[in-house]
Image (cartoon, rainbow, N blue to C red):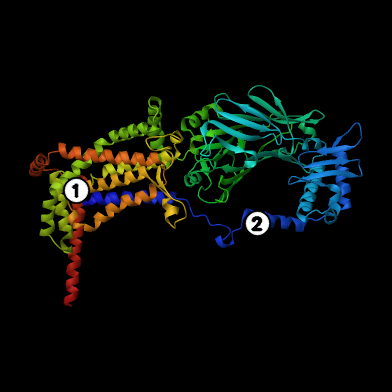
Amino acid sequence: MDKNTMYGLLLMGAVILGFMWLNQPEPKPDSIAPAEQITAEQAEAMADAQLASSLDTLTPAETSMLAAAVHQYGTPDSVSGRVTMQNSKVDLVSDGYLLTGSVNVDGKSVDIADLSNPAAAGLSPVIASKAVKLLKTTTRELTQYQGFARYLQGDSSTVRLENEYIALDLSNKGGVISRAELKDYKSYKGGNVVVFEGDDNGYSFILNSADREFDTRNFFFEPVQESDTTVLMTLNLGSGASFGMRYTLLPESYVVRMEIVQNGMQSIIPSNVATMDFLWHQKMIRQEEGRMFEERNSGLYYMYAGGGVENLSESSNDDEEVNERIKWIGFKNQFFSMAFIARSSFNNANLTSTILTKSQPGYLKELEAVSSVDYNASNPMPAQFDILIGPNLYPMLSGLDDKLNDGEDLHLTRLIPLGWTLFRWINTWIVIPVFDILGKWFTNYGVIILLLTIFIKIIIFPFTYKSYMSQAKMRLLAPEIKEINEKYPGQENAMTRQQKTMELYSRAGANPMAGCLPMLLQMPVLIAMFTFFPSCIELRGEPFLWVKDLSAPDAIITWSGNIPLVTEYFGNHLSLFCLLMTVTNIIYTKVTMQNQPSGASMPGMKWMMYLMPLMFLVFFNNYAAGLSYYYFLSLLITIVQTYVFRHVVNEEKMRAKMQEASKKPRKKSGFMARLEEAQRQQQAMLREQEKRKKGANRR
C-alpha cells in the first residue's frame, strides 16, 4: 500500500466517523437536575396540592346552574319525570331545581350534597376539588352542546375489525380506533406488536362556530356494522341531522379507509364554517429491546402536497409550524408506522415531537399534530383519509402509492431512513431488489446476507483487482523512488523531486491514485449498508447461529450499572459479531500494511491504522448484528482476495513489462503536459524568489 492509498484510507475513515458522529443522538438535558428529581408519587402529590388550592367547594349558585343544565339537556325518565345523566364519571338526577347524585373520583363515589361542606363530610380537599372540577366540566359540556347533549353520556364499548394482517378495536367514545395490533409481528415483551392502545393514541375532528364547539372526542357514537370489513360510527343528532365516521379495512392490507359522512348538518353547523380541525396525539410505545436505536429511528414525518417528505428531529425535542398544504402526516417507529393520508390534503399543521425520559420505560416519544381540512356542511362526505398502520416494509409501502391515490407518488417509502440521495439510490435500486430476490429463494437471513455480500464483491471485483495491480507497481517502483529522493534532497529540490517522480510513474505506466479508486467506490456501498440494516424489518426477530435477532446487537456478555462514557457510547454488553469484525479488520490492516512500500518512512502511520478497527468496535457495538456480520464477511472476502492476487500475480513479469514500457516513447497526455508546465513555472518562480532574497542579503 503506497502513501497516497494510506491517506485515502484515513480520509475515508474520517468520513465514516464523521457520518456516525452526525447521526448520533444529541444529549437530552433533563428538565430537572439529578439532585432535584422527584418520584411519580411526589409529582402526583404536588399536583393534588395545587388542585386543592384552586377549588374547595361547590356553591349553591353553581349547584342550581348544574341542576338546570342536567334538566334541560339530560335524559328524561317517563315514570318519575326526573332527568338523569349517567356515565363513567357522574350519576346525576335533576328535577329542574334540586340536584342529587354522585361523582366518581379515582374509584371513590362522592355524594354531591357533601361538596357544599367537604370538611364536615370528612372529604379530603384533594378529592373534593377533583369532584368540583369534574362537575364544572360537565356543566360546560352540557351548555356547549345544546340540542345533542344526550350523546355526551354512555358506557364505553368497542367493536372489532380485522383481516389476516391487522386487528383494530373501534371505540364508541369519540368514534376512534382505540387499539391496533399487528398479527405477524412480535414485541420484545411478548405477544403481538400493539402499535397503540387506550389513551396512547387519540384523534378527533373539531368544528367551531361562534356559539359552540363540536368536538368528536366528547361524544358516544353508535356503531353500525355495515359489513364484515366496514363499521359506521354515527351520531343521529335529530331533525334529520347525522354525523359519522365510516371505517373500511381493506383486504390483505394494513390500511383502513376512513370517510367522514354527514347529513343535514346545515341545521347545526353554520354555512360559514369552511374548515374542520384535526387533532392527533400519540405516546409511542416501545417495541424493541434496544431502546437507543429505536428512539433514534422514531419520529414525526410529513409530506408536502405535491412535494417532498420532511421530518422533525429524531434525536431531540422539536416542533414545526407548516403553513403549506400537506398530503400525509406519519408517526414513525423504528419498524412500524401510523400515517393519516388525506385524499385531498391537510391545509397546514403544527407539529410537535417530545422525547420521553427513561422514567417511562414503556414509551419513546410523545407526538402531536394539529391541522385542518376543508369542510362544507352540505357535503355528504366532506373528508376522506387512508390510515396506514403497519410495518415499515419497503415493497409494501412502495406498492401503496398506486393503490391509494390514483398513481400519485405518496413517497411512503421515505418512512424508511435509507440515507442521503446517493446512498438511498444504492439501497432502492440495488440492495433491496437483490435482497428481496434472495428472500424468495432462501429463508435463512444469515445466508441471504452472505450471498448479498458476495454479489456486491463481484460487482466491485474489477476495481479491487486494478487497485491491487496499482499497489504492486508502486511497490516495485519503491527502490527507484528512493534513489530520486536521495539524489534530490532538501526543500529546494522539492519540485525537481516531484517532477522526476511523476516522469517515473509515466514511463512505468503506474498511477499512484489508482489504489484509492476502489476504496472510493466502496464507500457509498458501505454507508448505504450502514443505513440499510438498522431499517431492515425483514431481519427483525430472525435468528442466525448464536444470534437471536439480526436487527439487534448479539450480546454475548452483559453487565448492569451505569459506567461513565462506557454505557453511553459502548453500551452494557459486548457484541460477538462486532468483535469478530474488529479482529478481522486488524488482520486486514496487517495484510495491507505488508504491501506498503514506504512503511519505514512513516512509522507513525502504523498505530493510526491499527487504532481505527478499535474505534469501529466502540461505534458498532450497539448496531444491528446483521450490519456487523456484513462488514465481517466483506473484510474476510477482501483478505482472501488479497492472498489470491499475491499467488496469481507474478511480480517479476510485471517488473519486466514496466522496464520494457519505460524504454518506449510515451505521448504525454494533456493533463500531464499542463502539470509539468505548472511545475516548471512554479520552480522558476521559486528560483526567482531565491535570487531576490540573496540580492537583498548582499545589500
Quadrant of residue 404 within the rendered picture? top right
Q: Residue furthest top?
A: 227
**Three-letter residue code for mark 1:** Gln
Relative horizontal placement of residue 16, taking residue 276 as reference (left or right): left
Q: Residues within 10 Å of mark 1 (few under 14, many from 20)?
A: few
Between 577 and 639, the residue placed more toward the observer is 577
Q: Residues within 10 Å of mark 2 (few under 14, many from 20)?
A: few
Secondary structure under badge 2? helix
Measured Cα–Cα span from mark 1 to mark 2? 65 Å
Per the image, the residue denoted by label 1 is 594
Quadrant of residue 463 within the rendered picture? top left
Label of residue 390 in the image: none
Quadrant of residue 89 within the rendered picture? top right
**Three-letter residue code for mark 2:** Gln
Query: Eyeballing the image, is 313 above or below 379?
Result: below
Between 555 and 690, the residue placed more toward the observer is 555
Question: Mark 1 or mark 2: which is in front?
Answer: 2
**Which quadrant would the C terminus be assigned to in this image?**
bottom left
Relative horizontal placement of residue 380, taking residue 82 as reference (left or right): left
Secondary structure under badge 1? helix
* Spot occupied by residue 114 in the image (x, y as percentages of width and height): 85, 50
Per the image, the residue denoted by label 2 is 42
Query: Eyeballing the image, is 184 above or below 120?
Result: above
* Spot occupied by residue 681 in the image (x, y as percentages of width and height): 20, 57
If you read the primary sequence from the N terminus, does the residue marked by circle 1 or circle 2 appear first? 2
The reply to whether residue 377 is in sight is: yes
Q: How many marks?
A: 2
